[in-house]
Image (cartoon, coloured by chain):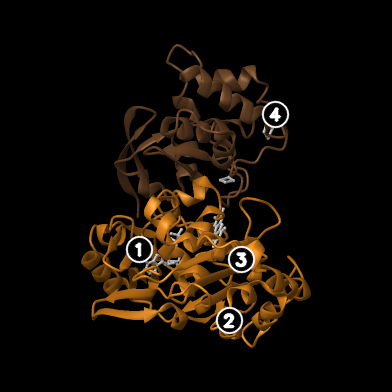
Amino acid sequence: MKHLDYYRPQSLDEALALKGERGAEALFIAGGTDVMVLGRQKKLDCAALISLRGLAELTQMKLEGDTFFLGAGVTLSRILNSPEAARHLPILHDAVQVMGSTQMRNVATVGGNVMTAASSGDTLGPLLCLEAVCRLVSAQGERRVPMHEMFTGPRVTAARADEILLGLDIPLPTSGDRKSSGCFIKLMRRAALDLALINVSVQLWLDEAGETIAKARVAAGVVAPTPVRLVESEEALEGAPLAEALKEQAADHALGRSCRPRDSDRCSSWYREEMVRVLVPRAAGRALNRMGIDAGQVG
Amino acid sequence: MRQVIEFELNGQEVSAAVTGGQTLLDLLRDEFELYGVKEGCGAGECGACTVIVDGLALTACIFPAREVEGASVTTIEGLASAQGELHPIQESFVNQGAVQCGFCTPGNVLSAKALLDENPSPSEEEIRVAIAGNLCRCTGYTQIVEAIQDAAGRKS
Ligand SMILES: Cc1cc2nc3c(=O)[nH]c(=O)nc-3n(C[C@H](O)[C@H](O)[C@H](O)COP(=O)(O)OP(=O)(O)OC[C@H]3O[C@@H](n4cnc5c(N)ncnc54)[C@H](O)[C@@H]3O)c2cc1C
Ligand code: FES
Ligand code: FES
């Protein structure tokens, strides 16, 4: 790995030009917490690294009207320390809190998590539930790909190799008068520095009266080759009175077509399925709690 | 392709010729002979190689050396005074019995320093979060947490 060329472009245009020159033999690197680990394991198949760390375009995090823009180069620590992220996007904030360690969060970026596209990627379920849109930039211009079209296979995204993820446009869940909140739960064997056995994300929107669930987004990781939305579970929740969200019966729908966990040396598929059933209603209950609804009473 | 970079290392301006894939860990140990930067797992998971770059604790074993160009880097060697007087955090670690085999100590002390520089009176929970990425096989962590509390108390 030592003999790689290493570029530190200072603008998006410069980075795209370098990628144009070096083509397939160059790989982008942001925080490097995935890239450098692969490099040390001698699994990195490239002749050059193009660092995205100097690109000011990628490091913004700002609320503009009803959209929260999260630059791909924003580190997990910055999200963790952002009061705005905690307030408007608690589902994402939950995830960042239980990722890696302080040292890892200080360098790892949200864009790197998306582009690595691991089924266990902890920001991915929250971003799916928030219906984030990926803004991909190349020499040909910018295109927008919704999160649910982003993950096309294990560690494969809809982005082309010459595209840089500029950032994510996240529509504010609480825009207008709608009440909404979400919650992310990660099942781990230890409290820090562990990949998820499974993770579950639930975002709920209430109707105007606050009595039924108008819209639900449910996602899970490590239950399929890619992070997935649990569409059957969403359908079961939508239109239901609040109490339904907490019932195991509703959770059974979570084990729909997209949820097909496998056995691994970390845990069995049986256990993963059982835990999806437990964690979907638990996350829904906490989301309701966050909207000031006593989940204990409703269910 | 070697590239000469300049950066600040423990308060001094230095330069070094680095290669593209070189890690900060290798640069600090091999070129600057700073053996207080330990290599445990080499994969970002144990924290033995923790250093502070521009105020942030990070694991040098998976950090590209090229990226410290223009930055300020602190290793454990940068904490004691030139006269050999220990930094207050180091003193607390010694006094509280937080150093046993010592392999994790540089990393834990630097994680503590990054925390206390940012937050001079952290709660126990905040301390535990700050060192969650620093594995210790000897102490059981209690003494380390107490040492950091002690150091915070002395500073304020
Ligand atoms: C100790 C440790 C603990 C970890 N814990 C967790 C965890 O708890 N949960 C979890 O989900 N992950 C975890 N990871 C994995 C990893 O840290 C995350 O996936 C992280 O978010 C990657 O971000 P990065 O900036 O370091 O990515 P990098 O390693 O820099 O890049 C990752 C990939 O994305 C591409 N890329 C990066 N940015 C862009 C961009 N803007 N445009 C186009 N391509 C881009 C790179 O080319 C590369 O293929 C852990 C890793 C380590 C080493
Ligand atoms: S050696 Fe760097 S984290 Fe273990
Ligand atoms: S003192 Fe031995 S590993 Fe911590």
Residue at 72% of width from left, 38% of height from top? B137
Indicate the quadrant of ligand 3 in the picture: top right
Three-letter amino acid code at the position of disc 3:
Gly
Q: Compare residues B39 and A149 and report the one nearer the observer.
A: A149
Instruction: Give the labeled residue for mark 2.
Output: A240
Label 2 resides on the chain identified as A
Cα separation, mark 4 vs mark 2, equals 58 Å
Q: Are marks 4 and 2 on the same chain?
A: no
Note whether B147 is above or below B85 in the view shown: below
**Label at residue A70:** 1
For label 4, the crowd category at 10 Å Cα-Cα, with few meaning under 14, some 14 to 19 and many 20 or more, is: few
- The amino acid beneath tag 1 is Leu
Which is closer to the viewer, label 4 or label 3? 3
Relative to B32, does residue B79 appear above or below in the rendering? Answer: above
Quadrant the C terminus of chain A occupies: bottom right
**Looking at the image, which residue is at 33% across and 76% down?**
A162
Residue at which label 3 appears: A285
The total of numbered circles placed on residues is 4
- Nearer the N terminus, badge 3 or badge 1? 1
Distance CA(mark 2)–CA(mark 1): 32 Å
Q: Nearer the viewer, mark 2 or mark 1?
A: 2
Tint applied to chain B in the drawing:
brown
| Residue type, numbered disc 4 | Cys
Examine the rendering and report whether any part of residue A3 can be seen: no
Q: Which residue is mark 4?
A: B101
Label 4 CB, ligand 3: below 8 Å? yes
Q: Pinpoint residue A167: horizontal percent, then vertical percent.
A: 34, 67
Dot in front, 3 or 2: 2
Residue A171 position in % (x across, y down): 36, 71
Q: Secondary structure at mark 4?
A: loop
